[in-house]
Amino acid sequence: MTEMPVSSAQLFGLCGAALIGIGLYGFIAHRHLLRRLVGFNVIGSGVFLLFGSTGYRRVELGADPVPQALVITGVVVAVSATALLVALIIRLAQLTGSARLPEESPGGGR
Amino acid sequence: MMPLAFDLFLCGLVLAVAVAAVSGRELFGSIVFFIVYGLLMALAWVRLEAVDVALTEAAIGAGLTGLLLVGASARLRRLQAPEEETGSRKARAATAIACLSIAGLIGAAVLLLDPRAPGLAPMVDCSLAESGVGNPVTAVLLNFRAYDTLLESTVLLVALLGVWSLSDERSWGGHGGLRQYARPGGVLATFGRTLPAIGLIIGVYLVWAGSKQPGGAFQGGTVLAAVWLLMAVAGVADAPRVSNRLLRLGLVAGPALFLAIGMAGAMAGDFLRLPPEHAGNLILLIEAGLTVSVAVTLALLVVGPPQRDLPHGEPS
């Protein structure tokens, strides 16, 4: 097992926190739904990294398997959600000709 | 301090690529950055000694999600959905400030965590001998927290039902709408014929190794799904009809087997409890079933809702 100073776990935790912020920005700032989906996935993996890093605080105990197992579950659920959202976005584009929500399109909605 | 320097560099790279993926000017470029980002994340998981997660992240987070997004952007381009311009500069600045403060708050919470908390690792170590497997992550996934995994395999199935229900009425029962890209004799056509053999072995090995080493049903199943998708994109295999009986059997086999073993546990006392003397074999059985279902479900999720016309335009 490689020796890793505990502060590295904190470093990845902070990286996860920053990724949540970056993903959230992409999710809010864009109107194109596929780009929002990219933001959504960045938020997700930021949460996973933050969670996983908490399982690596005591180096001598090794990595905690419980967060790892939950993150694996989370990654699979995230890809299912992404697949469903992709199908919804394409269906929306087939029906309206636009990959944005109707109320956010230039001419439509409110 | 060498490892810390490497981690710093890796985190910086991950953040830079994430910014590029989120704020890139063009949709396709941003998706390519997202795939790179997924691979770098896999590296970060290796640094956290979570090799099981690294395998999942590389296969699903970067590979399948990337394929889904690339496919979606290609379909949107064919539908000629316009690209977008972002909102006003003021709104973007306000959004950036808000997101920055949220990230700052979460970061502060990270630093406030007790750095010496032992977590649940000692408890898992204690009961590992009863779990029937040597890999603690597999033990948590399929024994200690089997409930989560059972629901997860069900979520996959429900997501696929959702995707299928988006097909229009006359397409129901048709083939999945995956486009084939290969030119005869091209690179993809060659890869589509040579790589599946290697991928098949790697996928099955990952499942088998999962009881003692990093690997398992989800990682192996994803590799198998990727093998089939490669063959489909290269034009070696056709997407099956969604009304195919065998296909539907493959979809539910894993969750059904899992549920049956869980119910057998309920008869003997506790739902999903595996008797320690048979746990190893039962886990292997569940994993085998799950691998098939995960592979078929993931592949069909990427393929998308059924269409009546074959992808190359000939009516079926």
Image (cartoon, coloured by chain):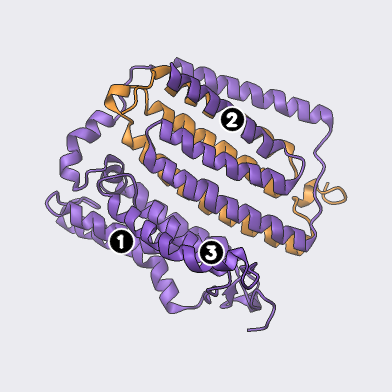
Chain colours: A orange, B purple
Residue A100 percent across, percent down from the top left: 75, 50
Q: Report if residue A17 is visible in the image.
A: no
- Which residue is found at the position 63% from the left and 30% from the top? B16
Q: Residue at x 38, y 58 (%)?
A: B203
Q: Which residue is mark 1?
A: B288
What residue would you read off at disc 3?
A: B191
Vertical position of residue B143 compared to residue A52: above or below: below
Please tell me whether mark 3 sits on a helix, a strand or a loop.
Answer: helix
Q: Residue at x 40, y 31 (%)?
A: B48
In the rendering, at what x and y percent does residue B19 appear? 66, 33
Would residue B220 be found to the left or right of residue B235 on screen? left
In the rendered structure, which amino acid carries the disc numbered 3?
Answer: Phe
What secondary structure is found at the residue carrying circle 1? helix
The one of B111 and B35 positioned closer to us in this rendering: B35
- What number is the disc on residue B15? none
Side (left or right) of A85 relative to A4: right
